[in-house]
Amino acid sequence: MNISVVVADGQALVRAGLLALLHAASGIEVVGEAADGRQAVHLATALHPDVVLMDVRMPRLDGIAATRLIVGGHAHRGPRVLMLTACDAPEYVSTALGAGASGFVLKDTPPERLVSAVRTVAAGDMLITPVVTRELVETYTRHHRALTLGLNRLGPLTTRETDVLRLVAAGLGNAEIAARLGLSAATVKTHVKRVMQKLGVNSRAQAVVLAYESGLVVPRGRVAAELSDGTSAATVPTAGPGGCPAPSGRREADPLRG
């Protein structure tokens, strides 16, 4: 079954390029295009696509506000939003993920990786490039120092659920987490679902943001504590310094998948 996609970008030339790229990709069907945020919300509501590829800067209604309306309008599984922007400013990243976006990619992403990102998000995983993740972590570290208060919010989680959240935040997919903890992929998926329910978040990405904010994950490589079985937890991938405009080296970094 094809992945249905709505493309939302305020620049006609960019939108045309995205449409051409996705039309040529196997297993992906573009069902609509939007030139502004309000139109994107309307199409997402009317067409129920699997993924909305959403530019951050949109006319009439910006992409983050549009994302909040799209994701918030569905009590159960609705369209997943993959944010697209030319700038990796941390305030964009944290706000977009907080609004419910499932991924965040840069406009200098190679075409084949953008297509892969759409497929990743459609499958229910989170996708953020490592350099964006690094800047997000550092931003939260600077501005959210109340680690004890944050960790208290994780109180409802069991020890195993906390372990799973650590590894999700470190960029591991369900299969990798299963192998590391000696669980089945189905069990890990259930743990992730329960973590989201207990934390009151509606996406895997928002759970990761909360892990950063709470201090469960710390910047530059190491999570806040070991796993419950005493083994070392996974590390958060790091990359060279980010910024806007993006450094050319960013193109060589693999996506971080949840």
Image (cartoon, grey):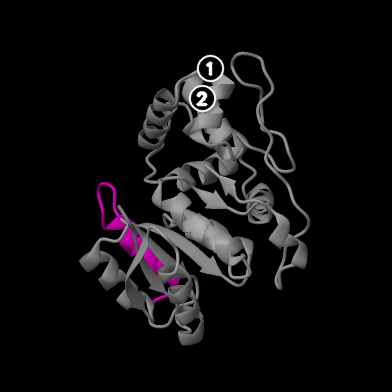
| Crowd rating for badge 2 (residues with CA inside 10 Å; few <14, some 14–19, many 20+) | some
Tag 2 residue? 178
Within the magenta stretch, is there residue 74? yes
- Please give the name of the residue rendered at 47% of the width and 25% of the height, measured from the top-left corner: 161
The extreme bottom residue here reads 12
Question: Is residue 186 depicted above or below 68 in this figure?
Answer: above
Element class at badge 1: loop
147 or 240, which is in the foreground? 240
Spatial CA distance of label 2 from label 1 is 6 Å
The location of residue 251, given as percent across then percent down, is 70, 62
The location of residue 149, given as percent across then percent down, is 55, 36
The location of residue 176, given as percent across then percent down, is 56, 30
43 or 57, which is in the foreground? 43
- Please give the name of the residue rendered at 66% of the width and 26% of the height, measured from the top-left corner: 233
Boundaries of the magenta span: 61-78
In contact (CB < 8 Å): disc 2 and disc 1: yes
State the mark number for residue 123. Answer: none
245 or 16, which is in the foreground? 16
Within the magenta stretch, is there residue 97? no
The extreme top residue here reads 229
Element class at badge 2: helix
| Crowd rating for badge 1 (residues with CA inside 10 Å; few <14, some 14–19, many 20+) | few
Amino acid type shown at disc 1: Gly
- Please give the name of the residue rendered at 38% of the width and 80% of the height, measured from the top-left corner: 36
State the mark number for residue 182. Answer: 1
Amino acid type shown at disc 2: Ala
Question: Is residue 126 depicted above or below 153 in this figure?
Answer: below
- Please give the name of the residue rendered at 51% of the width and 24% of the height, measured from the top-left corner: 178
The location of residue 155, given as percent across then percent down, is 47, 26
The quadrant where residue 213 appears: top right
Question: Is residue 145 depicted above or below 244 in this figure?
Answer: above
166 or 120, which is in the foreground? 120
